Each structure stands twice: as structure tokens, then as C-alpha cells.
């Protein structure tokens, strides 16, 4: 292991919020379409079905989805990707059982044609273990699930050390 844990990877924090459903994938195309829409008096629709002229919005506030300019909801939350899921990490959970892990409530991040949003209530638990080489992250529906998944990840990294310790008598026999 050379003093480093090669599998310790920080969770990714995302700051760019382009809607994956937006039909315009580059700024040049989107800008040209937006200028045409302003010229033609096209309206944009928000998630409450209110309509306003496209010219009332900065291009970055809109996405062209399913043939309509849609006003994107303001999403200013810090998002953390843990394995394959995006979360907004909430409050630290009080956990009395002996463990070196910290547990946090987590809100799932989703998106629709009006942009990103989070679940109304925390719907996952994120477990974090701080190491010298970074943090290990896992999630589950419950503290027990998150703890188990983080324990498995920790074992995957340290299995040679665990094996050597548990079989030290066999290994030291000459």
C-alpha cells in the first residue's frame, strides 16, 4: 500500500447546473436560439405554468426542453456525489454505538425539465470515515446500511492487513 490508500477518493462536489434535458448542449447554439426566441417574442414557461417573454430572462436561467423554453428553478445547494448518487448532505446524526464513522442525513438530488431539486425529507444516510488519505464515503437507507457499506469499503482497502493480523501465528511459523 506504500503508506497510501489507493481506493480513498473524495466525494465529488458539483457546482455547474446545466439541465441534462436541455436540447442545446453548447453555448453558441443555445445563444443563437435564445436570440431568435427573443426576436420572435417567444415565451418561457415556469414550473407553475406561468408564462413570461424569453427576453425577461438571462439565457442561463432557461433550458429548451421538449420544444419549450423552460425557466430553471434556482438551485444553490452544495451537491456531493457519493458513489453513483447525488446528495445534499444534511445534519449530523447522533449515533451512540461504538464506531469511527460519522453519519449524516442526506437528500437525494433529482432533476426534471425545470432543473434540479432535492427530496422534501432526508431519504438516505451518508456515512463518512476520515482517514489520513482523505474520506471514505458510503450511503444507505438506514444508518445500519450506510455503516455496512462503509465497512465493506474499508475492508476492501485493508483486507491484507486484516488477514495478516488474524493469521499472524500461521504467518510467523517457520
Image (cartoon, rainbow, N blue to C red):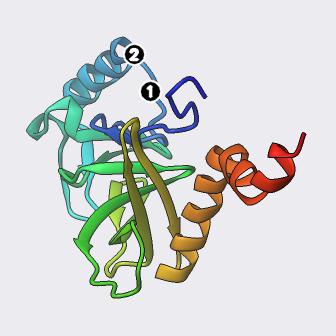
Q: Is residue 155 left or right of residue 99?
A: right
Do the CB atoms of the residues marked 1 and 2 lie less than 8 Å apart? yes
- In this figure, what is the number of numbered marks? 2
Mark 2, other Cα within 10 Å: few <14 / some 14–19 / many ≥20: few
Could you tell me which residue is drawn at 24 percent across and 73 percent down?
92
Q: Is residue 141 above or below residue 87?
A: below
Label located before the other in sequence (1 or 2): 1
- Residue 142 can be seen, yes or no: no
- Residue 7 can be seen, yes or no: yes
Could you tell me which residue is drawn at 47 percent across and 43 percent down?
67
Mark 1, other Cα within 10 Å: few <14 / some 14–19 / many ≥20: some
Look at the image and tell me in which quarter the C terminus lies: top right
Say which element carries label 1: loop
Q: Is residue 110 left or right of residue 171?
A: left
**Could you say where residue 141 lies in the image, as x and y percent from the top left?**
53, 79
Say which element carries label 2: helix
Say which mark, if any, is on residue 24. Answer: 1
**Could you say where residue 119 lies in the image, as x and y percent from the top left?**
36, 73
- Closer to the camera in the image, 64 or 119: 119
Question: Which of the 4 quarters of the picture holds residue 29?
Answer: top left
Could you tell me which residue is drawn at 33 percent across and 41 percent down?
13
Could you tell me which residue is drawn at 63 percent across and 47 percent down?
158
Q: Which residue is mark 2?
A: 29
Of all residues shown, which one is farthest toward the left? 56
- Closer to the camera in the image, 68 or 30: 30
Amino acid at each position: 500500500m506504500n503508506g497510501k490508500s489507493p481506493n480513498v477518493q473524495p466525494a465529488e462536489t458539483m457546482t455547474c447546473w446545466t439541465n441534462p434535458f436541455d436540447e442545446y448542449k453548447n453555448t453558441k447554439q443555445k445563444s443563437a436560439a435564445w436570440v431568435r426566441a427573443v426576436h420572435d417574442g417567444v415565451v418561457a414557461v415556469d414550473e407553475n405554468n406561468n408564462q413570461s417573454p424569453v427576453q425577461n430572462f438571462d439565457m442561463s436561467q432557461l433550458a429548451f426542453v421538449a420544444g419549450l423554453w423552460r425557466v430553471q428553478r434556482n438551485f444553490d445547494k452544495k451537491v456531493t456525489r457519493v458513489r453513483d448518487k447525488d446528495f445534499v448532505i444534511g445534519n449530523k446524526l447522533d449515533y451512540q454505538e461504538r464506531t469511527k464513522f460519522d453519519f449524516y442525513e442526506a437528500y437525494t438530488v433529482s432533476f426534471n425539465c425545470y432543473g434540479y431539486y432535492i427530496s422534501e425529507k432526508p431519504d438516505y444516510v451518508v456515512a463518512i470515515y476520515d482517514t489520513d488519505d482523505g474520506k471514505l464515503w458510503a450511503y444507505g437507507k438506514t444508518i445500519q446500511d450506510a455503516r455496512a457499506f462503509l465497512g465493506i469499503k474499508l475492508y476492501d482497502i485493508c483486507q491484507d492487513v486484516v488477514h495478516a493480523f488474524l493469521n499472524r501465528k500461521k504467518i510467523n511459523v517457520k
